[in-house]
Image: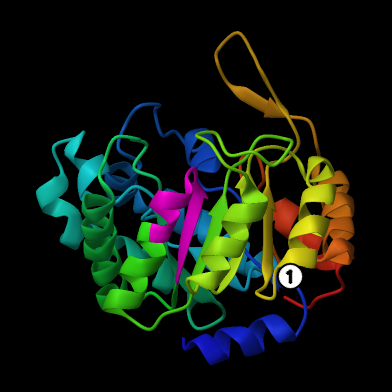
Amino acid sequence: MTKQEFQNLVSRGPLILDGATGSNLMKAGMPKGVCTEQWILEHPAALTKLQQEYVDAGSQIIYAPTFAANRISLKEHGLEDEMISMISRLVSLSKSCAKERCYVAGDLTTTGKTDIPYEELYNVYQEQISCLADAGADLLVAETMMTLDETMAAVEAAHAVCGLPILCSLTIESDGSLFFGGNIFETAVTLQEIGADAVGINCSSGPDQFESIISSLKDSLTVPVIAKPNAGMPTIDEKGEAHYSMDAPEFARHMKRLVELGADIVGGCCGTTPEFIRELVKILKKTP
């Protein structure tokens, strides 16, 4: 996908992303603490069933499960030398679900470390993005990012190795502040200035908490605005499992309001399922 093709896609109305991956894989039996990417490759049916359901529900972009498939994160599981092979196989799984009915985004995220020099971050993302582009990803998404520097490194690495569109979404506090300093408003403008093709927020909280933030982002940005929130706020039971406060129709109603306030690209994060995307598509009157 070229950057112009991406712009044309967004111009045709709210662009529908997928919903959660991790929380649904846990329901399918993935244990906590394992390498998600490795578990998926060992249990591919769990991922393909989920992503096929997202496509059927109306997702126009699904995220390849390459979230933490970078050398730093994979090293924690002793898998850093398997990165190229893992990314190729993971993107291929998602492409088999898309079957030209939707696009596949190469997914990348924070390393989770705050002491890594910018140059090293840049090299790590450059390596991962090269693998994603070679594997056939249609575009790139840097999601659940926590700092400006790390997100900038991902954007600049993307520009260095390919011409794919890169979307950036950060996780934030309810007032718009980032977890390690700064805020989404200034960060979003900076990311736009260095060439991000869309900017916004994901995870963090439910869509009802995003209204003023989305409105402010729309006022300050010229690139498309992303909203991919959780299914409301979670409560944790005695087994340590999260239960989210919103059902699919309520989530969809709040997401419609975010679209009215300026969100151009919408989907769901933790706690959302294909049913949430189906309700979202229905309330926005889009045809899967």
Q: What element carries label 1?
A: loop
Of the pair 11 and 214, the residue shown nearer to us: 214
Pinpoint residue 64: horizontal percent, then vertical percent.
Answer: 42, 61
273 or 267, which lies in front?
A: 267
Query: Relative to 94, is 185 above or below?
Result: above
- Name the residue carrying label 1: 264
| Residue range corresponding to the magenta coloring | 140-152
Q: On the picture, is 205 further left or further right than 152? A: right
The quarter holding residue 282 reads bottom right
Work out which quarter of the rendered image holds the C terminus and state it: bottom right
Instruction: Count neighbours of disc 1 (C-alpha within 10 A) and say few if under 14, some if 14 to 19, many if 20 or more.
Output: many
Q: Is residue 151 magenta?
A: yes
Q: Where is residue 229 in the image (x, y as percent from the top left)?
A: 69, 47
Tag 1: amino acid: Asp
Residue lying furthest left in this view?
A: 81
Image position, residue 279 (x, y; %) = 81, 58
Q: Where is residue 45 in the image (x, y as percent from the top left)?
A: 40, 53
x 21%, y 33%: residue: 76
- Colouring style: rainbow
Left or right? Give the position of 286 relative to 240. right
- Examine the rendering and report whether any part of residue 265 can be seen: yes
Residue depicted at x 60% and y 8%: 238
Tell me the quarter of the picture where residue 176 sits: top right
Residue at point 79%, 57% (across, down): 216
| Nearer to me, 10 or 24 | 10
Residue at the image point whose x is 64% and y is 38% from the top: 177
Is 251 in the magenta?
no
Near-viewer residue (80 or 31): 80
**Residue 92 seen in the figure:** no
